[in-house]
Amino acid sequence: MHDARVLVVDDSAAMRALFCDVLEQSRNVRVIGTAANAAEARDQIAQLMPNVVTLDVEMPGMSGIEFLEEIMTTSPMPVVMLSSLTQSGTETSLRAFELGAVECFPKPLKATPEQFAKTVGKLGKIVLAAANSNVRDKPRHRGPRAAADTAAAGYAANGKIAAFSTSMGGVDALTEILGHYPKACPPTVIVLQTEPALAEMFIARADKDCACAVRPAEDGAELMPGTVHIAFNPARHVIVEPGTPARLRLVDRDPVEGFRPSATLLFGSIARGGMPAIGAVLTGMGEDGAKGLRLLQAAGCRTLAQDRQTATVPQAPAAAVEAGAVDAELKLEDLAADVLGNCAAT
């Protein structure tokens, strides 16, 4: 892992100073320059050659989203967007993911200094992960895709549960995978580590664009073919309770190895319940899901990881592979086909 060399772009001098101070206190992160607008940033990128840019969405002249599109079109590089969590802010964040942003970070509004410090304390880890991402080698996302490339009309699920975990880069990865899902898809549970407002907006859009139903994970929800359940609430874990049909349970307990909801807890509940399933760890930070995937594998379930060479952020898939928990590493389109094939009725 190499150090992050960051260019901070924000039209507010106060915000530039605050973010610079936070990032400079982060291990293996160095701010090499700042810019107040797209024109300054364009020159700084050429002169300083940063390996990651933090970019404010709202700037005078060329907006952050317009400049992001320019960057990803002319010379792709890791970009972390800074946006408010208003409705328009989350809509813009989804557009930023479509254009190739590696992450969208909430810009705290009306926060106390203590709240601000707590919120942006996460930024250093995100920036470091972004600097070590595969954005430069990754093709730009093409936007929502139809499910017509699957045998949608004739697909029937065999009762296996599909379980995924993802964080940084996850919106883009899930857009690709769910775009392949037919209407009668396998019952699916996903742990998505992202801001709740962004997750809610993503779920609403995916439910509209995809052939299957996409819903927020709810306590007591039945796992039935045709529905994808996405857990994102940072206050509660999600587990699967055996039964006919199996059901989701949202539980209150401390974070597991720093994560809540925890993919390891989700995978482990499926393994302990002896339920037929297939599990996969997709792009993301940290090691969440690796131990749980190993439990699934030991229970006789097929286990997958997104290919480390093509994952936006390869940390989580790499941890699963290094734990010996993965039967196969696959590119997203092949991973989707593998899941659907293993969950199809013969």
Image (cartoon, rainbow, N blue to C red):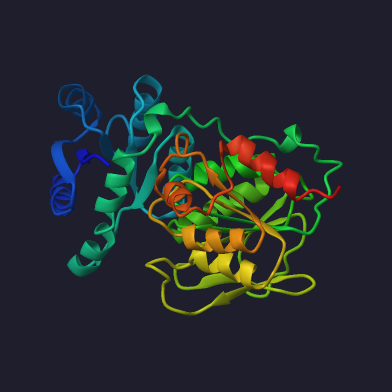
Q: What is the quadrant of the N terminus in the image?
A: top left
Instruction: From the viewer's side, name the closer residue of 338 and 90.
Output: 338
Residue 61 in percent (x, y) is at: 28, 30
Residue 297: x, y in percent?
Answer: 60, 58
* Residue 323 visible in the snapshot: yes
In this view of the protein, which residue sits in the foreground, 12 or 97? 97
Residue 218 appears in which quarter of the rendering?
bottom right
* Residue located at (49% from left, 79% from top): 252
**Which residue sits at x=42%, y=77%?**
254
Q: Quadrant of residue 120?
A: bottom left
- At horizontal 25% and vertical 33% (from top left) the residue drawn is 51
Vertical relation: 109 (above or below) 97: below
Is 250 displayed left or right of 254 in the figure?
A: right
From this viewpoint, which residue is outermost toward the bottom? 252
Residue 211 appearing in the image: no
Which percent across, then down, holds residue 259? 41, 66
**Closer-to-camera residue (36/98):** 98
* In the depicted structure, whether residue 223 falls above or below residue 162: below
Place of residue 305 in the rendered image (x, y in percent of width and height, measured from the top left): 54, 46
Q: Tell me if residue 135 comes above or below residue 104 in the rendering.
A: above
Position of residue 272 relative to residue 193, above or below, is: below
Q: Quadrant of residue 25?
A: bottom left
Q: Is residue 111 left or right of residue 245?
A: left
Horizontally, is 83 left or right of 324 in the view? left
Figure label count? 0
